[in-house]
Image: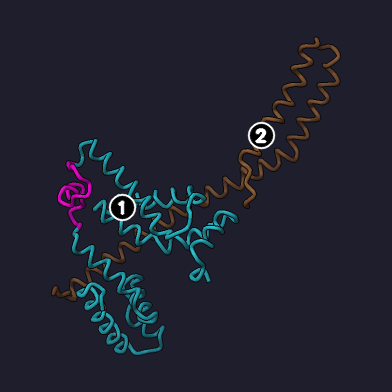
Chain colours: A brown, B cyan
Amino acid sequence: METITDYELDTLFQQSAQHHKAVEQINRQVLRTVRRDMRLKTLRKWAKQLGLCFGLPVAVVLYIYALFVFMPEMPEQLQAVYITIPIATILGLAAQRLRYFSPEV
Amino acid sequence: MKGNVSDIELIRQVLRENNSRAFDTLMQRYSLPVYNAVLRLMHDEENAAEVTQLAFIQAYKQLDSWHGGNFGAWVTIIANHIGLRLLEKEKRRGNVRFDDVQSTTDLADVADETYNEQREEHLLALEQAITQLPEADRQIIRWHYYDGVPLQTIAERLGQTENNIKVRLFRIRERLKKKIEHGNNN
């Protein structure tokens, strides 16, 4: 059976303390990255929310305004394109949302 | 108390509430065992620290793909993957000459010269033995050896004489030595 001397035990304590310091440093670095990522996530979430609340209505209003102003002067084919593009966009976005929808929170 | 909260609850807090403290608690729980596991693989403290850091960041990014089980073991697996990739890269660069990354003789090429397999085992045994001590004894060890608090200050904090603390520390050390010698079996 091997014996541990006092000197060896002291060396082990020293090394263990070094490991603990290294681990503390690791934790600090990781936490910094995690917090930065969380801040970005929150920022993106708010940007998305603001975009949805204000950006989308603005886009719709601008589109309807353009519809009234330019539509009468447009050729029929262009009018069809003008109507089809937003409908296709809405359907595409809806399909995408449904595809990634999960009832779980 | 965070210490009583289960891993799954902490992960839920990270995912749903963006709670960084919950992730910090997880790291406090598992970073030392993960670091030790990586150190056994890499044999180099600097690389082990870097790999452990990357593993926890990756674990955080993939947290929603964790399906329960032992969180520490999961992070260790991630860390080992990263570690092995790093060793492979080193090998390709020609910095390491080995055919089998598990071979300790070949891994010694990457190793820090100060690395010693037996000492690492003893170190693990010591850390495990410390966790098995009663809280009061553990606190003395923590103060004296990890925070560098002098015995006199510890005595004042605990309302005991310095000699009392010396005797207590001597007994704790003897207990720890025995545990290390017997591989924590007693």
The image shows residue B137 at horizontal and vertical percentages of 35, 81
The subunit carrying tag 1 is B
Q: Amino acid at mark 1?
A: Ala
- In the rendered view, tell whether residue B103 sits above or below residue A53: below
Q: Which residues are magenta?
A: B97-115
Q: Is residue B161 left or right of residue B57?
A: left
Dividing the picture into quarters, in which one does residue A40 lie? top right
**Observer-nearest residue: B13 or A43?**
B13
Residue B48: mark in rendering: 1
Q: Which residue has dot 2 on it?
A: A95
Q: Is residue B91 left or right of residue B30?
A: left
Q: Residue at x 76, y 30 (%)?
A: A59
The image shows residue B53 at horizontal and vertical percentages of 39, 51
- In the rendered view, tell whether residue A68 sits above or below residue B103: above
Q: Is residue B106 magenta?
A: yes
Q: Amino acid at mark 2?
A: Ala
User: How many numbered circles are shown?
Assistant: 2
- In the rendered view, tell whether residue B45 sits above or below residue B86: below
**Observer-nearest residue: B87 or A105?**
A105
The image shows residue A51 at horizontal and vertical percentages of 70, 38
> Mark 2 vs mark 1: same chain?
no
**Observer-nearest residue: A104 or A3?**
A104
Neighbourhood count class around disc 2 (C-alpha, 10 Å): few under 14, some 14–19, many 20 upward? few
Residue B62: mark in rendering: none
Q: Residue at x 28, y 55 (%)?
A: B39
Q: Main secondary structure of the magenta part?
A: loop
Q: Nearer the viewer, mark 2 or mark 1?
A: 2
Neighbourhood count class around disc 1 (C-alpha, 10 Å): few under 14, some 14–19, many 20 upward? many
The answer to whether marks 2 and 1 mark residues whose Cβ atoms lie closer than 8 Å is: no
Q: Is residue B58 left or right of residue A41?
A: left
Q: Is residue B102 magenta?
A: yes
